[in-house]
Image (spheres, rainbow, N blue to C red):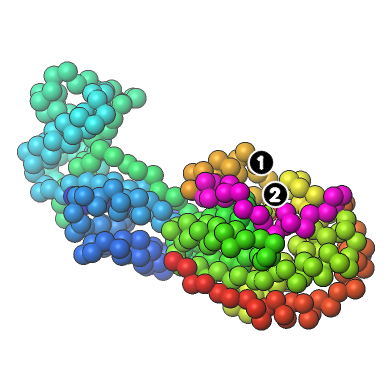
Amino acid sequence: MIILVRYGEIHLKGQNRPFFERLLLNSLRDAVSGFEGVTVERGDGRYYVENFSDRDLEDIINALKKVFGVHSISPAREISKDLDSIAEEAILQMDEYILEHGRKTFKVETKRSDKRFPMNSNEISREIGGKLLDHDPELKVDIHDPGMRVFIEIRDKAAYVYTKVIMGQGGMPTGSSGKAMLLVSGGIDSPVAGYMIAKRGVRLSAVHYYSYPYTSERARDKVIDLTRILCSYAGPIDLYLVHFTDIQMAIYEKCPHQHLTLIMRRFMMRIADILARKHKLQALITGESVGQVASQTIESLMCTDAVADLPVFRPLIGMDKSEIIERAESIGTFETSILPYEDCCTVFVPKHPTTKPDIQKIEESEKVLDAEALIRDALEKTEVLHLS
Ligand code: ATP
Ligand code: MG
């Protein structure tokens, strides 16, 4: 077996195309690095994954499927370019398919990029279709809405036959669009936000604020687990763990309670911004969605934006919770996100948070704090985990 990997949007990238193709090659090689001897090579507008044992096929496909920039994947057999071999292989794969999925209507689709091959695509499809019908007279052709397709490609090097096209994530290869810092909580939203920006080719770092002893070890581990799931798509991620308790206590003791959440969120933004700039990252990412909670009204978002120098990306801004949950399920973070461990925000929630904060009033409420000292202290206690 061989695996064909197709890519999508890179096609649009003109002169930068070799750069994108190289990044994608690296990501694909990283994705299969756990399987000994597997090779990934680039050739005529796609990648070829080879030298694996059949029992690893499914795991390798699952790993490749997660690589950003991959449009689709097909496990295929490479055979010599003569009609008899192609027919024999098509029959074999049709039988395998029927065994697995039952008999369906079918269609043969041929692509011929080797124009020296003596028949054109339509002729090949017709010929192979005929041989399939001879082999299994109960089969039926449906050109317009087939239950299955047999694909044949005639390329320079060889012919390829396959029946499956597995969709990839799409997006752009990791590292092709700069770097950003994800503010990751243990909730449902922020991992999805990180996934969405990473999918556009942005390399991620992440920062998490924890409030030990008000939040448990397990809450921290949950965030580490969530970040690891993101790594399986986006490659290695540096996760900064910031001890946030002293800041929260100071806010809790000294500031008006209706402003607690917002002031806390402003401290998160400030620290994320400092860490990001220190490590040459170019943007911040949060899982906020407009109107979801009091701290996510437009007025509140203005207040948190105001303390960040870097642009703040909020890819979920126009999504409903149900849509975010659907995404979380499909990328595999949902099950972990709903584990019931306390988040630092839920420990210090005010009973009546402001929903239309006035930025001057917030700044006024904050004045009693020695922000610089609090932040310096938190940064000193910050640890970093290199996750992959
Ligand atoms: P999530 O599901 O991502 O926790 P949420 O709907 O619970 O989001 P908030 O708790 O208001 O919303 O947080 C909004 C955003 O702030 C989060 O999406 C995340 O980006 C960031 N954030 C919240 N808590 C933390 C934390 N403890 N550490 C790092 N970032 C956080
Ligand atoms: Mg949260």
> Is 202 on the left or on the right of 3, as rendered?
right
Task: Give the alpha-carbon distance from disc 1 to disc 2, as whole Å.
Answer: 8 Å
> Is 212 on the left or on the right of 177, as rendered?
right
**Can the viewer see residue 368 in this picture?**
yes
Residue 72: percent from the left, percent from the top?
36, 47
Please state the extent of the stretch shown in magenta in the rendering.
333-353
Residue 194: percent from the left, percent from the top?
57, 58
Could you say which is closer to the camera, residue 255 or residue 175?
255
Q: Is residue 377 above or below residue 226?
A: below
Going from the N terminus, do you reach mark 1 or mark 2 first?
A: 2
Q: Is residue 148 above or below residue 212?
A: above
Which residue is tagged 1?
320
Amino acid of disc 1: Asp
Could you say which is closer to the camera, residue 40 or residue 377?
377
Callout 1–callout 2 Cβ contact below 8 Å:
yes
> Which label belongs to residue 289?
2
